[in-house]
């Protein structure tokens, strides 16, 4: 997973009416891609909504070491639900693209 893949996911979410920010309401790309404690968290919400949903991107470094790169992205989970998207090495495949679209469409 590279920064381009995160941008694509962000664009898909925004294209379906979600506002994407980090957990501290920053919307700039630098903040949206900072790994902290092997995780990136995004808040997403609808334009006039007061409630938000948290997406957690989980990373795993080699041999259990802390993650230091976007290439170590493992999954994205809608916090407090069972909805999860697992990233595969073939992230450009048609199946993975469909899985990302299905995941985005499943978020309520």
Image (cartoon, rainbow, N blue to C red):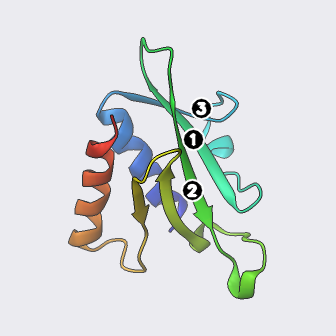
Residue position marked by numbered label 2 in the rendering: 57
Please rate how many residues cluster around mark 1, counting C-alpha atoms within 10 Å: few if below 14, some from 14 to 19, many from 20.
many
At 50% across and 64% down in the image, what residue appears?
75
Q: Residue 56: x, y in percent? A: 57, 51
The mark that comes first in sequence, 2 or 1, is 1
Pointers 2 and 1 in contact (C-beta within 8 Å): yes
Q: Where is residue 91 drawn, in percent x and y?
A: 37, 72
Q: Secondary structure at mark 1?
A: strand
Rendered location of residue 35, percent (x, y): 71, 56
Between disc 3 and disc 1, whose residue precedes? 3
Residue denoted by label 1:
42
Q: CA distance from mark 2 to mark 1?
A: 8 Å
Q: Quadrant of the C terminus?
A: top left
Residue 21 vertical placement versus 7 (above, below):
above
Q: Could you tell which of marks 3 and 2 lies nearer the N-terminus?
A: 3
Label tally: 3
- In this rendering, position of residue 40 left or right of residue 76: right
Q: Secondary structure at mark 3?
A: loop
The mark closer to the camera, 3 or 1, is 1
**Residue under the image location 74 percent in, 69 percent down:** 68
Question: Callout 2: few (<14), some (14-19), or many (20+) C-alpha neighbours within 10 Å?
Answer: many
């Amino acid at each position: 997973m590279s920064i381009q893949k995160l941008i694509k996911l962000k664009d898909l979410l925004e294209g379906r009416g979600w506002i994407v920010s980090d957990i501290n309401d920053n919307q700039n790309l630098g903040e949206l891609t900072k790994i902290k404690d092997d995780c990136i968290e995004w808040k997403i919400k609808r334009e006039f909504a007061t409630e938000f949903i948290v997406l957690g991107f989980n990373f795993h470094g080699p041999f259990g070491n802390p993650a230091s790169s976007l290439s170590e992205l493992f999954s994205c989970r809608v916090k407090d639900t069972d909805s999860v998207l697992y990233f595969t090495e073939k992230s450009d495949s048609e199946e993975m693209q469909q899985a990302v679209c299905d995941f985005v469409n499943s978020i309520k």
